[in-house]
Amino acid sequence: MNDQIYKEQLEKIYNDFTSQMLSMRTEMDGLNTIITDMKEHEGTGSVMMMLPHISRYLNETGNQTETVELDTGDTAWMLSCCGLVLMMSVPGLVLFYSGMIRTKNVLTTVMQIASICCLITFLWMAFGYSLALSPADANKSSNYLYGDGGRLWLVGMEKDSVHQSASTIPEPVYCMYQLTFAMITPALMCGSFADRMKYGPMLLFMALWHLLVYCPIAHAHWHPDGFLFELGALDYAGGGVVHISSGIAGLISSVILGHRKNYGKEAFEPHNILLTAVGAFLLWVGWFGFNGGSVAANDRAGMAMLCTHISGAVGALSWSLTEYLVTGKPKMVGLVNGLISGLVTITPACGYVEITGAFFMGLIAGPVCYGGSNLKIR
């Protein structure tokens, strides 16, 4: 009887051992495939593209039953960054633009920016988040330009659900952080057509632009299924998604709308430089959430923040120096424009460059943007 029991126990141990070895062999084969793919992409800047494939592999073969472990430090940092980036739109951008226009159009500009933030919030909840950043599950896939529609009206998002691109924080926090980017992008365009676009058509244009332009660009850059992501495009914190897209759209819209009425006949001077300066400084502080919040609370975030600060400061100095050499008198508007130039320039690269790179990016940004602003006037 005892021999029979021992035999059954030995058979059970042998079967368990064999099963574990087969499972380990399967996992090793899968990991070897991933490593081979990574070596093929080595040096092209696209190694990060393999991360979602590793995530999918672990989910498919690991048979994991435990819940994802959320990181309280990452969550707290990202909550703070949500507030910082929101501050960039209201009141940062509100003050920055309203100080540079004529007095009679201040309230119009303020209302436009505030209304854009409210409109994009609704669109993001209903359609935008799903079109730009779904699916949240790494086991599902979408096309190259749009999400799969799995988060329309944020259906399926729970307080403890996670997104494949931010697995250490709750998905609602990730959604809110991305919403602040979606809000400020169209709001940036308001300065391009200040004094020239009516309220109703402006809201319609912004709604269509968000759904037809911003969402596919964000998906292509930031979702693992996006075609630019798969090509290895490096946009750390929104240089392409936010600044290039809004800059080009603002330029085209201003060209189509044409000159302001009585342009060249009346003085178009900033009515309150102090408001513009305060708005620029709020943008400067908020930029630490804009760039530093693009990853978890780690050493890379710290380097991104430091590079952001250096580039912005050097950009302000280089613009002012250029303006002094050209006109003999640096101006406050030039200083803050140089500051913004340096911050914008470093945004897509702040997580990939070091201190020297950030210095030269700010140094180049000031004179180049100064020349561009004067070319616009001519």
Image (cartoon, helix red, strand yellow):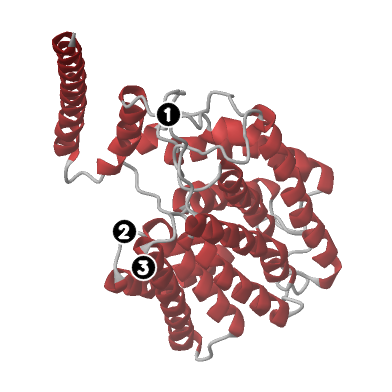
Q: Residue 227: percent from the left, percent from the top? A: 38, 32
Q: Left or right: where does residue 368 sit relative to residue 252?
A: left
SS assignment at label 3: helix
Decide which of 140, 367 is in the foreground and name it. 140
Badge 1, how many Cα within 10 Å: few under 14, some, many 20+? few
Q: Residue 130: percent from the left, percent from the top? A: 59, 31
The label shown at residue 303 is 3
Report how far apart the C-alphas of labels 1 and 2 lie in the structure. Answer: 35 Å
Nearest-to-viewer mark from 3 and 1:
1
Q: Amino acid at mark 3?
A: Met
Where, quadrant-wise, is the N terminus in this rendering?
top left
Name the residue: 59% across, 24% down: 149
Badge 2, how many Cα within 10 Å: few under 14, some, many 20+? some
Where, quadrant-wise, is the C terminus in this rendering?
bottom right
Reply above or below: 72 against 39: below
Q: Left or right: where does residue 264 sit relative to residue 80?
A: right
Report how far apart the C-alphas of labels 3 and 1 lie in the structure. Answer: 36 Å
Q: Amino acid at mark 1?
A: Thr
The label shown at residue 65 is 1
Q: Residue 127: percent from the left, percent from the top? A: 66, 31
Q: In the rendered image, which residue does mark 2 sit on?
A: 352
Q: Left or right: where does residue 126 sit relative to residue 104?
A: left
